Image (cartoon, helix red, strand yellow):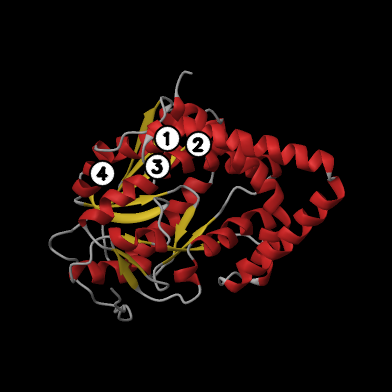
Amino acid sequence: MQDSLPPPTAAAPAPEAHPRLGVVVPAYNEGTWVRRALDALEVSADRAAWPLEVVVVDDGSTDPESLRVLDEVGERPHVRVVHQPNAGRFAARASGLEAVTADLVLLLDARVEVAPESLQRIRQAVGRGDEVWNYDVVPGSHDLRALFWTGITKVWWRDYFRHRRPIAFGLEDFDRYPKGTGAFLAPRELLRSAAGGFASHFADASLASDDTRLLRTVAEAEPIHLSPEVLCTHHAKSGRGSWSRQCYYRGTTFVDGYLSDAGRARGLLAGALGAVAVGGVVAATLPRTTGTAAALACVAAGAVARSCGATGRESLAVGVLSPGFGVCFGAGVLRGLRMAAGPA
């Protein structure tokens, strides 16, 4: 299903069904990123003439500067800060959904800044009955580690990024289009129902997938709208250690998001470990051939990213960082399979 968004107008009365916009922001040692996210949000909400109800959920932050910023933003009249022990982003979002009272909610990561005109466009669409929106994301840095994520995203969801256009998708084409809880708007009760029906494959809730299976439930109920006219900027963690940890973490949550049956985890784990062992033997036996093959694979990865809509620098990031990503993400997948498999 496809539609187009009209240009924003200056005088757009708030839809009676949604007189306020609820916003849930999970934060863990995010420092000034929380302030930046809220500043951008307020600019966009002001242009849309849409009153805000913001719940910032502190997920057990330990950084003194981050805690000071949370105290500061908590003094804003439309912001409420909720503190909880560290339990992971999914649990933080669930707490925020319980605390917010507005009937339409934007899930927003602390490192995301919404574009000034975005809420005005969404608000007009909501008035027409289109109440579920996923923001289109642009990178906030030219650092290769940050650009790697946008590059690899364009490969994964190339159907959209090869030709960005307004679309609406449901469960049947869910895997063809980008989506995530970093900037996602939907009715509160739909989000609460999806979160309440979510069961992680992991005992450790802090490693639960906080988007794929949750949003799959949303798409089953309502079409998800996406448009290049509804943008946000994501500031990815780009330090060497942060990037590696993020790859490892995403490998683990990937298992939780896409493993349909936890009972398959043991078989998949055995197969993955076997593949790693064979790969290690081949690399040790034929190091030069392995190195050449790896270099060619990096070049091919960059070329594929470029063909899928990535910029030149994003393609470079995919090519250069694919080996490191493969190691860290693969290790995360193994961890996820081991956790899902449970005790031997």
Q: Are marks 3 and 4 in contact (CB under 8 Å)?
A: no
Residue 187, above or below 198: below
The residue located at (53%, 27%) in the rendering is 62
Q: Residues within 10 Å of mark 4 (few under 14, many from 20)?
A: some
Q: How far apart are the two marked residues, 2 and 1, measured between alpha carbons? A: 6 Å
Give the residue pinned by disc 4: 194
Q: Amino acid at mark 2?
A: Leu
Frontmost residue, 240 versus 176: 176
Q: How far apart are the two marked residues, 3 and 4, measured between alpha carbons? A: 11 Å
Q: Which mark is residue 210?
A: 3
Q: Which mark is residue 6?
A: none
Residue 221, above or below 307: above
Q: Residues within 10 Å of mark 2 (few under 14, many from 20)?
A: some
The residue located at (24%, 38%) in the rendering is 197
Residue 343, given in percent of the width and then of the height, sits at 46, 18
Q: Nearer the viewer, mark 1 or mark 4?
A: 1
Could you tell which of marks 2 and 3 lies nearer the N-terminus? Answer: 3
Q: SS at mark 4?
A: helix
Frontmost residue, 119 versus 339: 339
Q: Amino acid at mark 1?
A: Arg
* Whether residue 26 is visible: yes
Give the residue pinned by disc 2: 268
Give the residue pinned by disc 1: 264
Q: Nearer the viewer, mark 2 or mark 3?
A: 2
Q: Is residue 285 left or right of residue 18?
A: right
Q: How far apart are the two marked residues, 1 and 3, measured between alpha carbons? A: 21 Å
Q: SS at mark 3?
A: loop
Frontmost residue, 161 versus 136: 161
Residue 253, given in percent of the width and then of the height, sits at 47, 40
* Whether residue 65 is visible: no
